[in-house]
Amino acid sequence: MADIKDPENTVIIELKDGNVVIELLADVAPQHTARMKDLARAGAYDGVVFHRVIDGFMAQTGDVAHGKTGGDLRRAGTGGSEHPDLPAEFSKLPHERGTIGAARSANPDSANSQFFINFSNNDFLNGQYTVYGRVIEGMEHVDAITRGEPPANPDQMISVKVAADV
């Protein structure tokens, strides 16, 4: 298991092939980190699909309104949560392989529940999307997520838990 330094700011995402352990960066993006933990603790991310997965770029998920398996997945990627949108928390952290970024619309202050995991270094996103976490274990499971926009048979987050609660 990963060396978890701060269980309160670590999230474990269960995928079909194994767990992905994410270190949240509360000191860099406290509001985004808090939102992810709130939604994880509420079970909102459980069963949500990866609705946009682009090879060599990133895997996007987190549409808790429309992204649940068994729901209308044609709308996945258009929704968020019942919580208000978050203001951007841009930093100098680069969008490197394994970092977690906040998905949003054209409005920089429109991030809500959706996020993406970078498959590669995506420097063109730097300073434009909030980085608020990084994969510390299980990137091979992220690499195995089914590709597509949307994938024909999308993978899902089976469960998302805060490590302090496990």
Image (cartoon, grey):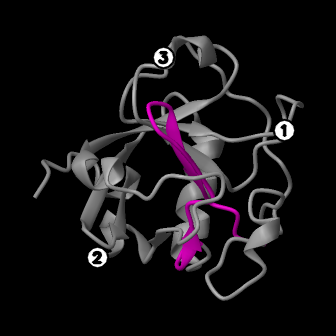
Question: Residue 97 in the image: x percent, y percent?
Answer: 37, 28
Q: Quadrant of the C terminus?
A: bottom left
Residue sitting at the far bottom: 70
* Distance (Cα) linking label 2 and label 1: 33 Å
* Distance (Cα) linking label 3 and label 2: 29 Å
Q: Is mark 2 on a helix, strand or loop?
A: loop
Q: Do the residues labelled 2 and 1 touch (CB within 8 Å)?
A: no
* Earlier residue among tags 3 and 1: 3
Q: What element carries label 3?
A: loop
Residue identifier under label 1: 105
Question: Residue 147 in the image: x percent, y percent?
Answer: 49, 52
Residue identifier under label 2: 166
Q: What residue type is labelled 2?
A: Val
Residue at left 29%, top 54%? Answer: 21
Camera sees residue 85? yes
Range of magenta residues:
45-65
Q: What residue type is labelled 1?
A: Ser
Pointer 3 local density, CA inside 10 Å: few below 14, some 14–19, many at least 20: some
Question: Residue 6 in the image: x percent, y percent?
Answer: 28, 49
Residue 65 vertical position relative to residue 79 in the rendered view, above or below = below
Question: Residue 67 in the image: x percent, y percent?
Answer: 68, 71
Residue identifier under label 3: 93
